[in-house]
Amino acid sequence: MKRLSFELDDESHVEFFRTLVKVKDGERYVVGRPDTRTFVELPEVGAQAITLLQKGLSVREVQEELKNRFEKEFDVKSFIHELLSSGFVKSIEGHAVTGVPVEGQIVEVKGERKRLLKIRAEHVKWLFSRPFLGGFFAPVITAGIIIMLLNPSYWPKPEDLLFHESLTLVLLGVYGISFILLFLHEIAHLFAAIPLGVQGNIKLSNRLFYIVLETNLTNLWMVPRKKRYPAYLAGLIIDITVISTFTILMWLSDIKVLGGSGGIFYGLAKAAIFLELLRVAWQFMFFMKTDIYHLFADYFKCKNLYGDTMNYITNKLMKLFGKSDRQRDMSFIPENEMRVIRKYAIFFLAGTGISLFLYVFLIIPLMAIILISTAQHLLSGYVGNEAAFIDSIVIISLIALNFTLLGYSLWKKSRLVFRRKTAKSLREPTLKE
Amino acid sequence: MEKIAVRKIEDIKTTDLELDFIITVLVPSLKLIFSAEVDVWDIPVLPWEWYLGFEWILGPY
């Protein structure tokens, strides 16, 4: 038996949190609380029901009014029940709903809502403005592309990573550059979102077995769709600009305008370009929730593409194993979205399958080779084998760091899922019929 | 009585790949390949045998 926290009947009046916002998005409405970063999508009738309830009409009065407007009877009680589960209802008949975060309360895992930077819109709104995009980013990117097209020697190659003979120096150098570029990418997202009135935060997470930094920009749902696109693309714009900038610098160096070519900085620039290329390519693996995934899903007006795809695949499996009664209801999803979901499901399965295959049959064997080679160097001892010994320690440390970060991310995710499940069960309402 | 559909909207979380894992696999592999300690074509050739009998470990590496 779940905890009884309130009673709802036909004469009940509902009070919503003041932070509840309602934004028209095409033919539907996005409704949610930016303070808890919880949003749902409603049809016109749902938005009107909320407006009527906010005006102080009782459940019965709202039901009658909706019947007059739409010539249909709607189940307002179950609708309120759903809004309660989303944490939008503050009180019913003056009785506060328990187990729901009040305005300003932090709901996510401790620390998640801490803002990385206290930067205001006026500080950064120029960065992804049309004049700056056209006057700086576009010319730099174009110049870099032209140099690469005219000089194939600037095309990034895997061996560009080996910019020095010392493996330790290469690993630490590449790791350092990678870390800086990683932050640049995520800060670009933050800076693109701030002028839209959206504050985000950066945290460590994972996609499959990849460690990632992620920026939570869920409140972008409050802004019109076309304004969301630059926020999704900001990181990629910075990545491509970095590639182009380093290409231009290398070219200037080669034509002796900027010192001579071939030094350590030249090598680091080449390594940075290859690393950025890997990142850009990875973003297009949008069977995971990458930046391109969000752009793709939003373009096709799918607000829960990943979740709906999971449900679609689960339903297919249930049907396959003769458990059709356990299928999830997807009848309310419009046909245009279902078309995208069906195609995305194929892409998702193929992409995930190939990724896992490569991980198991390429990455793990490669790692085994490296670990064996590393162990041999360590067992040979330090004396007479100094460079290889230090290389081995650095490799093992970085591999250990990677698995520690992956384990930490998975542990945090599982804790968050557990907390959300617990919180949901506490505020699950029992309706008085 | 018709239900009013309430659809959950997913979180928007932009991401970037932390390359630690790629670096630690890719860089030493490239080093091994370019120093000709490992032939690049040998790496993924016999994964099944590696998994079945650890022949990679017992082999030339």
Image (cartoon, coloured by chain):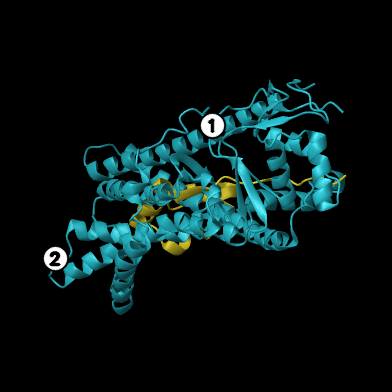
Residue in the image at 81% along x and 37% along y: A61
User: Is B32 situated left or right of A324 in this image?
Assistant: left
Kindly state the secondary structure of the residue where label 2 is placed: loop
User: Is A162 situated left or right of A203 in this image?
Assistant: left
Q: Position of residue A273 (x, y in %)?
A: 32, 61
Residue in the image at 59% along x and 57% along y: A297
What chain is tagged by disc 2?
A
Task: Find chain A in the image and tell me its colour.
Answer: cyan
Compared to residue B44, the image places residue B55 above or below, namely above
Q: Between label 2 and label 1, give the one nearer the viewer.
A: 1
Quarter of the C terminus of chain A within the rendering? top right
Residue in the image at 58% along x and 57% along y: A298
What chain is tagged by disc 1?
A
Image disc number at residue A108? 1
Q: Which of A93/B36 is in front?
A: A93
Residue in the image at 46% along x and 64% along y: B41
Residue matched to label 2: A258
Kindly state the secondary structure of the residue where label 1 is placed: loop
Question: Of the residues under marks 2 and 1, which one precedes in the sequence?
Answer: 1
Quarter of the N terminus of chain A within the rendering? top right
Q: Which of A410/A53 is in front?
A: A53
